[in-house]
Amino acid sequence: MQLFSIFGDPVSHSRSPLMHNSVFKNLNYKACYTRTHLLEGEKLKETFFALKLSGANVTVPHKEAAFNACDEVRGFAQKVGVVNTLINENGKLIGYNTDADGFMFSIEEFKNIKKVLIIGAGGTAKALAQRFLEESLDVNVLNRSAGRLEFFNEIGCNTFTWEDFQVQQFDLVVNTTSAGLSDNNLPAPQKMIENILENTCYVADAIYGKLTPFLQLAKQKQLPHKDGADMLLGQGVLANELFTNYQLKKEDIKEQMEKSFLY
């Protein structure tokens, strides 16, 4: 019996156990998936091996710590320095990133996206910014302060702090911060958010399972909007393929994960 987990702080809200256990149970794969509340990112590696895990997912705020904990990082995660999926490969910790492709899957219905604003500068923002640039999009990043914006400047994004942001016309605005996850906060001052939403076509939030204050405003303005559920599904399917070493069909994994959202 293989054991998998998700590391995060907070983590009690995570739907990942339901999603992955639905796959394992219904496709007769001998594994179990649980949650691990991790306060200190630097203890991720020792905790992973102490629990004798075969693999794990990583959520906020530990995705960059997960990158640093890996013995080897593969694929897209190498470009962004952000890991959300871990595999135990013969005692070595191997890191991947499935967030970005999961998000692209989630916004397929949003058409003619050319100019994007990302709010926040954490691990999810890094993954999305790099992926958007690969799609030749005009990528803009807004963060409270300049401290975390260096990465985005280096890869070719336009960056702004709350102090110097000037509202422009965007096709898509994405909140990647944790504002609204366990509180009623907006990801930036209300007047700024109102102005942003009045100048965009589509709105997305990486948070899932609730209508955040950010999405409530988007709904009030009758903007097409999405929470992070489809992103969660998309990245989850890709992570499960890694967990099961591609022994299960992607279509079957997706079908069982979709069913878990009905529970």
Image: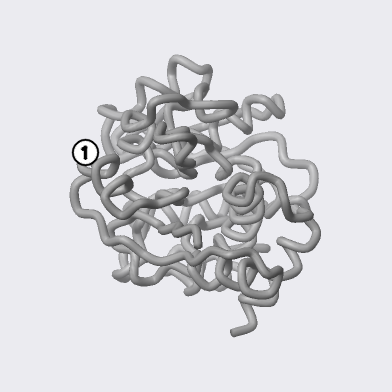
**Image quarter of residue 228:** bottom right
**Total numbered labels:** 1
Q: Is residue 191 left or right of residue 158?
A: left
Q: Nearer the viewer, residue 138 or 229?
A: 229
The figure's colour scheme reads: one colour
| Up/down of 161 relative to 207, above or below | above
In front here: 24 or 218? 24
The answer to whether residue 192 is seen in the rendering is: no
Residue 179 rendering spot, x and y as whole percentages: 34, 59
Name the residue at 44% across, 44% down: 119
- Identify the residue at horizontal 53%, vertical 38% (top origin): 97
Q: Residue at x 21, y 38 (%)?
A: 42
Q: What is the residue that sits farthest to the bottom in this orientation?
A: 263
Report which quarter residue 9 is drawn in: bottom left
Instruction: Using the image, determine if residue 150 lies above or below residue 184.
Output: above
The image shows residue 210, relative to residue 167, as above or below, that is below
Please indicate whether residue 46 sits to the left or right of residue 16 in the image. left
Towards the viewer: 151 or 102: 102
* Quadrant that contains the C terminus: bottom right
- Residue 142 x, y percent position in the rendering: 41, 37
Q: Secondary structure at mark 1?
A: helix
- Residue 48 coordinates in the image, percent (x, y): 32, 47
Residue drawn at x 79%, y 48% as measured from the top left? 111
Seen in the picture, residue 75 relative to 88 is either above or below; the reply is above
Identified by mark 1, the residue type is Glu
Q: Which of the pair 194/82 is nearer the observer?
A: 82
Please provide percent x and percent y for residue 67: 38, 32
Asked where in the image residue 218 lies, by quadrant, the reply is bottom right
Residue receiving disc 1? 42
- Can residue 58 be seen here? yes
In the picture provided, is 68 more to the left or to the right than 141?
A: left
Q: Quick one: label 1, few (<14), some, or many (20+) residues within 10 Å? A: some
